[in-house]
Image (spheres, grey):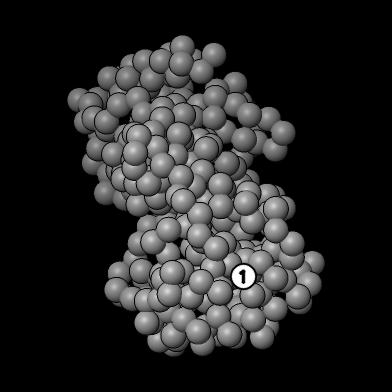
Amino acid sequence: MNLLFVPSTLSKIRSWAAIGVFDGLHIGHRYLLKQLKLREGRVVFTFHPHPYDILTDKHLPLILPYERRIEMLMKMGLSPVVIEFSSSLAKMKAEEFLGEIKTRFGVTRYLVCENFTIGSDRKTAEDLPHWFEVLSPKKKAGQRISSTWIRECLSHARIEEARSLLGYWPRIWGKVIRGDGLGRQIGYPTANLDWEGDLLLCEGVYAVKVRLGSRVLMGVMSIGRRPTLGGKEMRVEIHIFDFAGDLYNRRIEVMVMEFLREQKTFSNLRCLKEAIKEDVERVKSLLL
């Protein structure tokens, strides 16, 4: 078992733990982790990469970049330990895996939700009651809150629904890189984003808020291939209101507030400029 991250503040003996991928750290995850914080000697075991990637040889897009998941867990006052999910780990049976965790960290009890399974032998919490305490999962409109549900919301631009499940606005992080300067030429300079992790949001134009250090500014974000210009590569471009500084090579956080419209192909740059003007006015009416 290979560990990718262990907090320097983690003591060796931890009696209680939670275990899972926790992609998105949605309100269902947070409910379980809040209960975990009431126990003594708590630790959170999470996996990277996602088990789906190893078991199917396909990539499952993640809601949160791996590093952001760790960062958010630590901000919640928890101690995350990242276990590398590999083909050899996938072959471990439940008791073997739990035994190794006990030897390394002293964990003897786990807090999990219903339908939890572990190990190549697919043991449930009911199969191993001496290891697990089971909580009922959080639901919304009678449906269990899940990362799969949230991924579907994001890929179909259901931003408010995603927010209600996550407990925070969906967001993108990344570094601002140089573009071709077209936005500046037509009066709407943009920050071109080299985004972190996976891009789950569908192509379109969005109302956003951008965190720049201690400042939070409004903006309009375009995700797409710039069809008016015959573009082929996916781009994330953000026009930030009331900002005239240099953002190149700076890392920014973009909070996605609302879907405005789909991408369109305009007949010329003048029509594109008019559409952006309308987008800006709409964002200001929504967010001011």
| Above or below 123: residue 249 | above
Please tell me in which quadrant of the rendered image residue 276 appears: top left
Which residue position is annotated with label 1? 109
Q: Quadrant of the N terminus?
A: bottom right
Total numbered labels placed on residues in the image: 1
Q: Residue at x 43, y 58 (%)?
A: 114
Q: Residue at x 56, y 48 (%)?
A: 30
Q: Amino acid at mark 1?
A: Arg
Residue 288 appears anywhere in the view: yes
Q: Nearer the viewer, residue 186 or 283?
A: 283
Q: Residue at x 58, y 67 (%)?
A: 110
Residue 172 appears anywhere in the view: no
Position in image of residue 135 (x %, y %): 51, 54
Direction from residue 74 to residue 11 in the image, left or right = right
Position in image of residue 76 (x %, y %): 68, 49
Q: Residue at x 69, y 63 (%)?
A: 42
| Above or below 269: residue 78 | below
Position in image of residue 252 (x %, y %): 59, 42
Label 1 environment density (alpha carbons within 10 Å; few <14, some 14–19, many ≥20) = some
Q: Quadrant of the C terminus?
A: top right
Q: Nearer the viewer, residue 91 or 56?
A: 91
Q: Secondary structure at mark 1?
A: strand
Position in image of residue 227 (x %, y %): 25, 37
